[in-house]
């Protein structure tokens, strides 16, 4: 009974209700602006809320976190500028839908599916937090490395028509991810003596340039083409559509929860993996992936919001942050005299159940705010291109500068914008570059940790991979995906009466 009272405490107190609504509303618009991250917003909030009671502070932060993760999809769909790394995969099929005049449908579907994903993540947090935490702490550095390798295999899904060009782009992204100081030894890598390069290249500046600026430059070729009229008569997806995509959303939500619960990962990796999963399990999409497949929206949008609930699991039960935002929230809890970890649920169960109930409330506000104002947002795409493209460039410059208040990030953004424009002209996809730079750090750090823990012995490392059930399972999944991309596997399936190939295999083999 006490747990129930804690669960609904933020629902029944007008002050907490208003703060959650305000946080979610602000989070949606902060998340929609490239460069303004949820991490930055929550960290700024600490300085304002450290003198508050803990519940009002948590209500505001929870709202911003939930709204901000969803908000990145708005500009990803409308302008091909992901508001946050978690919305990169959303842009792959969301922007093509907007170019067809279906931006309203895309935003409506992404909002409803984000709600489902968020709800499932919170449900797992409420009923299975200790179990998921015990599973998450089983991951060793070698398992994180294998997880990163599994993520790199997504390059096949993001390569477009040419696998060779996708591999080139992915390799380039991984190379760019190594620029800066070595995290273990502080040795300079590819800095050429430049102080500006010692901190590495900002993935967000790179993302804004490659997606936003390059698209603006590319559209200059069609400057006088009429703006596409957006259909806004049907925004909320039909019940039939929800039923159709519900099985996929449950699968990708599970991916989001698990990836979100792994410390050091987050919604961006979860969304990319969910996009690949959607592509593999969808046999006959109405339109091909990359050209406006709705399954390409459902997968990443459910996964990145489910990852929010997942990120809270290790934070509340083990005191280990699931991502950067929960790391800051842990700091806020310490400021308020709390000690997140195994004893929190015993000593302060009210905080756990308050967080669960408040996240559900923020998720509902996200659905309400997400489905309102869509008609106004879609008018952005209908603006004359002579107004729209300078607006995109201005937004990109502001977003890049706001990352670190550094003009160097603006130059990087503009440089990668021109580079992305040239890549697109010659048929290269920019998605694999962003994938490479995101995963290179995860792979690099954990390979080093894994091999150091084995005292630099490669045989001991390999022995650990094959003797650990978890590592062996991840290795088998990687091998299965690799074998599934070969012509041998396709011939095997055809011989056994299943001519349909997996989505990933098709993308790799059929188009090369």
Image (cartoon, grey):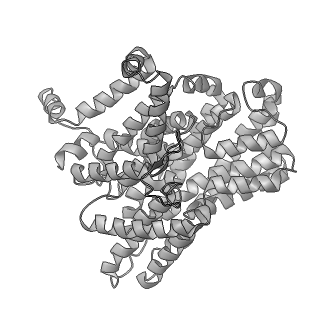
Relative side of 161 to 444, left or right: left
Q: Is residue 196 above or below residue 327?
A: below
Residue 61 seen in the figure: yes
Left or right position of 28 against 393: right
Q: Nearer the viewer, residue 460 or 97?
A: 460
Q: Quadrant of residue 217?
A: bottom left
Q: Please indicate whether residue 93 sits to the left or right of residue 163 in the image.
A: right
- Give x and y (percent) for residue 278: 37, 43
Outermost residue to the top: 467
Q: At 24% across and 54% down in the image, what residue appears?
A: 165
Kindly identify the residue that appears in the image at 67 percent across and 42 percent down.
327
Between 42 and 498, the one nearer to me in the picture: 42
- Residue at x 26%, y 68% (from the top left corner): 425
One can see residue 243 in this view: no
The extreme front residue here reads: 193
Q: Residue at x 63, y 49 (%)?
A: 66
- Residue 260, x across and y down, in percent: 55, 38
| Residue 486 position (above or below residue 109) | above
Tell me where residue 245 appears, x and y as whole percent. Answer: 43, 44
Q: Is residue 225 above or below residue 8?
A: below
Is 309 placed left or right of 240 in the picture? right
Q: Position of residue 130 (x, y in %)?
A: 64, 24
């Amino acid at each position: 009974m006490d747990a129930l009272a804690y669960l609904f405490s933020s629902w029944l107190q007008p002050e907490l209700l208003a703060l959650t609504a305000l946080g979610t509303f602000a989070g949606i618009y902060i998340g929609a602006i490239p460069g303004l991250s949820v991490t930055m917003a929550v960290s700024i909030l600490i300085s304002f809320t450290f003198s508050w009671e803990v519940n009002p502070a948590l209500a505001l932060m929870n709202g911003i976190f939930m709204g901000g993760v969803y908000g990145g999809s708005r500009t990803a769909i409308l302008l091909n500028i992901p508001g946050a790394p978690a919305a990169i995969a959303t842009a792959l099929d969301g922007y093509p839908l907007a170019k067809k005049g279906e931006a309203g449908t895309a935003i409506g579907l992404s909002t409803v599916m984000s709600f489902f994903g968020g709800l499932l993540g919170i449900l797992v947090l409420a009923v299975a937090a200790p179990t998921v935490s015990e599973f998450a702490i089983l991951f060793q550095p070698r398992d994180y490395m294998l997880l990163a390798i599994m993520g790199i295999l997504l390059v096949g899904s993001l390569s477009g028509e040419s696998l060779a060009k996708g591999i080139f782009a992915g390799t380039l992204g991984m190379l760019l991810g190594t620029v800066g100081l070595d995290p273990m030894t502080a040795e300079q890598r590819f800095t050429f003596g430049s102080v500006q390069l010692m901190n590495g290249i900002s993935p967000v500046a790179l993302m804004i340039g490659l997606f936003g600026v390059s698209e603006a430059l590319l559209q200059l070729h069609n400057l006088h083409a009429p703006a596409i009229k957006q259909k806004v008569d049907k925004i909320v997806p039909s019940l039939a559509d929800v039923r159709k995509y519900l099985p996929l959303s449950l699968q990708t939500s599970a991916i989001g929860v698990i990836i979100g619960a792994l410390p050091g990962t987050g919604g961006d990796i979860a969304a990319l993996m969910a996009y690949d999963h959607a592509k593999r399990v969808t046999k006959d999409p109405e339109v091909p992936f990359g050209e406006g497949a709705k399954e390409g929206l459902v997968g990443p949008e459910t996964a990145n919001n489910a990852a929010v609930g997942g990120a809270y699991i290790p934070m509340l039960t083990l005191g280990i942050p699931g991502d950067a935002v929960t790391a800051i929230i842990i700091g806020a809890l310490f400021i308020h005299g709390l000690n997140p970890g195994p004893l929190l649920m015993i000593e302060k169960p009210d905080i756990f159940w308050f967080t669960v109930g408040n996240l559900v409330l923020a998720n509902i506000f996200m659905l309400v705010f997400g489905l309102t104002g869509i008609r106004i947002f879609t008018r952005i795409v209908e603006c004359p291109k002579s107004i729209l493209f300078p607006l995109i460039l201005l937004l990109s410059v502001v977003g890049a500068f706001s990352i670190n208040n550094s003009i160097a990030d603006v130059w990087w953004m503009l440089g990668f914008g021109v580079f992305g424009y040239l890549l697109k002209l010659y048929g290269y996809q920019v998605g694999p570059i962003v994938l490479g730079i995101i995963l290179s750090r995860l792979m690099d750090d954990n390979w080093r940790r894994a091999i150091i823990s084995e005292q630099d012995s490669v045989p001991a490392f390999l022995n650990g991979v094959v003797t650990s059930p978890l590592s062996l399972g991840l290795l088998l999944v990687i091998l299965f995906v690799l074998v599934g991309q070969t012509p041998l596997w396709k011939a095997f399936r055809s011989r056994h009466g299943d001519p349909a190939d997996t989505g990933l295999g098709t993308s790799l083999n059929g188009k090369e």
